[in-house]
Image (cartoon, rainbow, N blue to C red):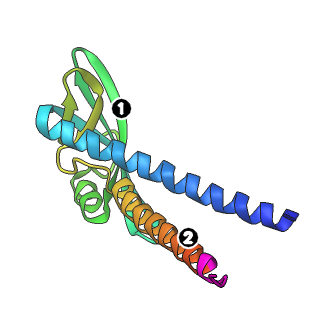
Amino acid sequence: MNIEGFIIIAIFCSFILMFIIVIGMGCVEFTIAHRLRKHGENVEGYIEYVDLKSARPGGVYGKVCFTYKVHDRTYTKKQTVDKDTAVVFLRGMPAASWLSKEHITVMFLPRKPSVARLAAAPSDRMRILNFIVALIVLGFLVALMLLSILVYTNSYPSY
């Protein structure tokens, strides 16, 4: 096998590894959302800031930074939300950062208070969308590999 073959295999393996990582992150997000629905408790929190971002395939989304307090300890988290949720949070925020901050409801796990999501957006949508896209692309690659193996094995005459 020549060097070009090794480079193609290395690139292919890096894409597969990237898809596996994205799928793993999506599975973690599904698990967190499920645990929060089942065991989560609510606490009042405050939005620090909302940042609208532009993504290439997914359109516009927002990053929301929020703080909440559990057992006299303050936690600060960032969460990705869809454009509509981010705009709603932006409309409720004051024009100046030193004015009062918007109150929100935060869901957290009682046994691990550092795991939390906004109650209005209980899952990280971008991770879930990336998870779905990665599953589709990985399934397509596996089907393409199986098809190429089938074509390769049938290209030789049988005796």
Q: Is residue 154 left or right of residue 143?
A: right
Q: Quadrant of residue 148?
A: bottom right
Of the numbered discs 1 and 2, the one sitting upstream in the chain is: 1
Q: Which mark is residue 145?
A: 2
Magenta stretch encompasses residue 31: no
Q: Name the spot of residue 142 as percent of width and height, x first.
A: 50, 66
Report the magenta residues as a range.
Answer: 152-159
Q: Name the spot of residue 93 as percent of width and height, x first.
A: 26, 50
Q: Which mark is residue 113?
A: none
The residue singled out by tag 1 in the image is 76
As shown in the figure, which amino acid type bears the numbered disc 1?
Answer: Thr
Q: Name the spot of residue 60 as percent of width and height, x first.
A: 39, 68
SS assignment at label 2? helix
Task: Name the residue: 52% across, 69% down.
Answer: 141
Extreme residue in the top direction: 72
Q: Nearer the viewer, residue 18 or 125?
A: 18
Q: Is residue 112 left or right of residue 44?
A: right
- Which SS does the magenta portion mostly show? loop
